[in-house]
Image (spheres, rainbow, N blue to C red):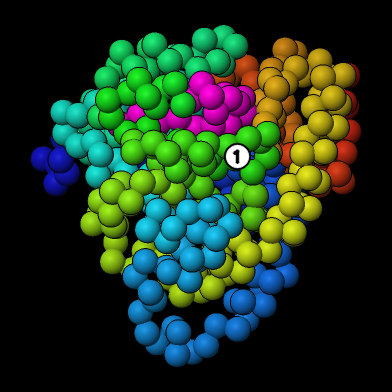
Amino acid sequence: MSYFRPNIEAMEGYTPGEQPEDPSVIKLNTNENPYPPSPAVMKAVAGVQAEQLRRYPHPQGNLFRDAAAKIFGVKRENIICGNGMDDILNMTVRAFSGPEAALVYPVPTYTLYGVLATIEASIVKEVPFPPDFSLPIEGLVNARGRVTYLANPNSPTGTFVPAEQIGKLADALEGVLCIDEAYVDFARENCLELARTRPNVLVMRTLSKGYSLAGLRFGFAIGHENLIRGLMKVKDSYNVDAIAIAAATAAIQDQAYFEQTRQKVISERKRLSAALDRLGLRCLPSESNFLLAACGQPTARELYASLKARRILVRYFDYPGLNDKLRITVGTPEQNDALVAALTDLCRR
Ligand SMILES: Cc1ncc(COP(=O)(O)O)c(C=O)c1O
């Protein structure tokens, strides 16, 4: 006898990337930013008063909403805050899908979508990306989702679909289109204009990647007032804490620091991709802060294990279509050099 609902009993939970306890490990496995957050963030955290912790935080995180509204050219009513983007994803799945409703996304992609859908007992419809990872518009529209998810740039591929294509998809869909822009800070364009102009588009962002705040847990979504109003009903009452609101507001306001960090990651991505290519590890064109490198001999699994033994962590996915590749986060120049040196040695043997 199980105490759980049958779908919970039957499902596998989400498997997060490894978080090693040893801080000296070169950690290129979960797409964190290799640079620290803005000094303004640390100042804001230090400035949090005891009184702010004694009280409940603002239920909607309005300090952040107002700061972000200014930066993204929308109103406070167009923004909802979350305890990381995962919290936003959870809200959207609960709000838009539900038992018997179709939830659609192209694959391969972020595996959490399927996990959250299974918890809600939604009908999951996975539409394969074509080999060039262009947008399978027809397949996605024909799947007739109550809600459709699209990570752009996608993970774990790092590939990118132009906003104009996504606009066509949004217009053809009957349901909501949730665009996961976790990695958009490293891409050439974004879909904010679609969120500003379409009633069925929600753009979801995180401060975990471009703003170096994965440990803080802060994400947000931008969309039509109606979408945001509905999501507010579903969220936890105080889903972002007082420290997170203060830190996230400081981070989003320091756009000069953000721009600097982002450029450093983009230029290292180019350098690392070229170095991996020279080793015969071909990378897909990436607009994110990671690369998906195809391996031959040694195999991806062997390289993952050998790198781990040398205290370098990268991500290996044991799934069909991905188990011959490694997903490698772009690190600092020193980290990337250490990775390339280790790979050069391993590939030569
Ligand atoms: C595609 C994608 N979406 C969302 C997230 C979740 O971001 P957060 O750290 O804000 O929960 C991640 C995290 O790695 C991701 O890869």
**Relative horizontal placement of residue 182, taking residue 115 as reference (left or right):** right
Identify the residue at image location x=55%, y=28%: 163
Is 66 part of what is drawn in magenta?
no
**Foreground residue, 130 or 178?**
178
Is 162 part of what is drawn in magenta?
yes
Residue 16: % across, % down: 49, 43
Residue 318: % across, % down: 53, 24
Q: The C terminus lies in which quarter of the figure?
A: top right
Q: Is residue 159 above or below residue 188?
A: above
**Relative horizontal placement of residue 113, taking residue 315 as reference (left or right):** left
Identify the residue at image location x=30%, y=16%: 143
Question: Under 8 Å from ligand 1: the CB of mark 1?
Answer: no
State the residue position of label 1. Answer: 184
Magenta part of the chain: 147-166
Helix, strand or loop at disc 1? helix
**Foreground residue, 147 or 50?**
147
Q: Is residue 29 above or below residue 277?
A: below
Using the rendered view, name the quadrant where residue 38 is placed: bottom right
Identify the residue at image location x=57%, y=19%: 323
